[in-house]
Image (spheres, grey):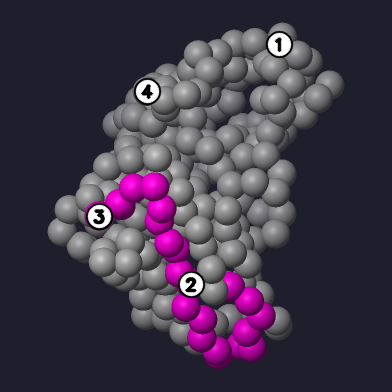
Amino acid sequence: EVQLLESGGGLVQPGGSLRLSCAASGSTFRSHAMSWVRQASGRGLEWVSSLSGSDGSTYYADSVKGRFTISRDTSKNTLYLQMNSLRAEDTAVYYCVKERTPYYYYGMDVWGQGTTVTVPS
Amino acid sequence: DIQMTQSPSSVSASVGDRVTITCRASQGISSWLAWYQQKPGKAPKLLIYLASSLQSGVPSRFSGSGSGTDFTLTISSLQPEDFATYFCQQTSSFPLTFGGGTKVEIK
């Protein structure tokens, strides 16, 4: 079974940038859709972005559109989230998630342990 | 955007109790709904997809039902390891949205 390991989180000043990485091991996620989901401390889950496993289409929450970019390097079995123009409201634990299929309809069946992004206000 | 409303926001129950959590979508989503369990400090875990399909490895005491706008997650006999927060998620269309969560606490 695939396992996901995120890295790249940290403390960044407002307006700064970070790139999160998600390395998959145990199997390839080449044919699966992949997503990023975040959770602010003590809050619920917020979908951030998805990348289709069928045609590579990308999707973004309005709150991050134009600032974040999701991408994948299949040769490295790694998913990325480039985050620019960071704001205090982006502060959260970011989870890398594998969807059950190439599409997003069938649930997120593998989650990473999360990486924390902190943007002070 | 499709809004997902869960109720109750918290429930106190005892081991062995039957627990039902409700999730309502602001518009019809057919059966495009998933349920997750999250324990403190841990990542969520997929329990149910397509409203009623049990994810591999999930105990059969968990079940899901519903279609359209109204859905339920039922735990038939609550076990100590089931005390956690549960989230629903609509997978019908972007933006994917989650319910606010239901915390199942020990009575």
Q: Residue at x 66, y 31 (%)?
A: B8
Q: Quadrant of the N terminus of chain B?
A: bottom left
Asked if marks 4 and 3 fall on the same chain, the answer is: no
Place of residue B45 in the rendered image (x, y in percent of width and height, measured from the top left): 53, 38
In the image, is B85 to the left or to the right of A79?
A: right
Amino acid carrying label 1: it is: Asp
Residue under label 4, please give it: B53
Crowdedness near tag 1: few (<14), some (14–19) or many (≥20) residues, C-alpha within 10 Å = few
Q: CA distance from mark 2 to mark 1?
A: 42 Å
The numbered mark at residue A20 is 2
Placement of A59 over or under B72, stated as above or below:
below
> What residue does disc 3 label?
A30
Magenta-highlighted residues:
A9-30
Mark 3 or 2: in front is: 3
Q: Are the residues under badges 3 and 1 in a single subunit? A: no
Tell me where residue A16 appears, x and y as whole percent.
55, 89
Q: Nearer the viewer, residue B19 or A19?
A: A19
Q: Are the residues tagged 4 and 2 within 8 Å (C-beta)?
A: no
Q: Residue at x 77, y 29 (%)?
A: B105
